[in-house]
Amino acid sequence: MSILRVSRLLLALIAAQATAAAAADLRVEVVTAAERPVPTEVQLSGTLEAVDSVVLGFRQGGRVVTVLVEEGDEVRADQALARLDPVQQNEALKVAEASLSAAEAAQAQARQASDRAAAMLERGVGTRAARDAAAQQLSETEGAVERAQSAVEQARRAVEDMVLRAGGPGIVTGRHITPGQVIAAAQPALTLADTDGLEAVFRAADHPDLDKAMGRTLRLRTIDIDRPEMTGEVIEIAPLVDPQTGTVNLRARVDAVEGSTALLGAAVRGYLEMPGPRGVALPWTVLMREGDHPAVWIVGADDRVSLAAVSISHFTDGLVYLDEGVAPGTRVVGAGSQLLYPGRRIEPATVAPEAAR
């Protein structure tokens, strides 16, 4: 047998094998397109604050003598926090107490005079006018005593007001005064935060669907300190944009965590999933290219494939969302799509669960 004939036989054998291989169905992964909402995650940056806080100030003005707490200190109810110089108030109290003593002495004398006038009238040696005058004098002195007692109470309260006390348990989040400073009545001195619960306060961009965040759960992660991830619920969204910052204030109540007082003022990042438009979800492995446009291999009823251009809406972790080109329920080639050509017959290796699980 000549070499030429042997070569022809080999070429014919190779061609036959290639034809058989081409005729065999190609095993590829097939997935079913499903429609589902496109998740949109909004990231927010903010701080943790107390649910309730109060700004404390003295009822009277004066010079600060001492401040007994620092920022971050926990305080109990009725604990002394700061003091003003009480010299003037102490002097006013002494004067009021002296006036009360004088009024009480005058009252005692008027009572004795009233008793004598009444007794003399009963014995017939006095007059009704004298008795009435003595009774009138007693009534005036009693009124003077009541006024003096009220003045003493006011002076004592003024002395007590020189000490700033906590109305309840809390933590000091702001100290606005220093010893030697002269402050006015009701001027902010200290800020106390309630220890019962935390809120995350954010300044969010004016997202068109931000109003849908009300009542939704978000994840919280501290930025500067290492703490476990927290969760919270959006409880308030400002109706208007802040004209100075161009943002919308958003507040979320943080679920109970241990050591919440140590987190006051901590910077946090919030992750909020917002509902978006619906799209056809598929694994990213389905994507191919047709010219300058993305495309996918569509599996027909006869298990032959055709290339269809698509429009991509969003990418997420492991998924691509299409808004044009593929209808829900359509079978699409996943892994192995790079081996296909139009009209190629395929055999599903595994039918993947719907992408919209």
Image (cartoon, rainbow, N blue to C red):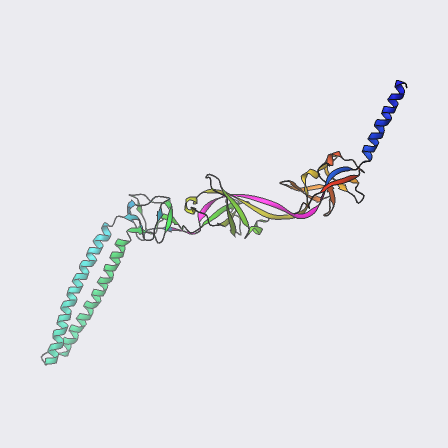
- Residue at image coords 83%, 33%: 20
Q: Nearer the viewer, residue 251 or 152?
A: 251
Figure quadrant of residue 326 = top right
Rendering coords of residue 299 (x, y %): 77, 42
Question: With respect to residue 278, does 15 lie above or below?
Answer: above
Identity of the residue furthest to the left in this view: 125
Is residue 309 among what the camera can see? no
Q: Residue at x 74, y 38 (%)?
A: 28
Q: What secondary structure do most residues of the magenta stretch adopt?
A: strand
Front-lying residue, 29 or 251: 29
Residue 217 drawn above or below residue 149: above
Q: Where residue 115 sits: x, y (%)?
A: 13, 74
Image location of residue 122, percent across then percent down: 12, 80
Residue extending farthest to the bottom is 124
Q: Is residue 337 visible?
A: yes
**Residue 40 on the magenta segment:** yes
The segment highlighted magenta reads 31-54
* Left or right: 51 as drawn, with respect to 62: right
Furthest residue to the front?
1
Q: Is residue 107 magenta?
A: no
Count numbered badges in the picture. 0
The N terminus sits in image quarter: top right
Q: Residue at x 17, y 75 (%)?
A: 132
What percent of the width, then of the height, locates residue 301? Answer: 79, 45
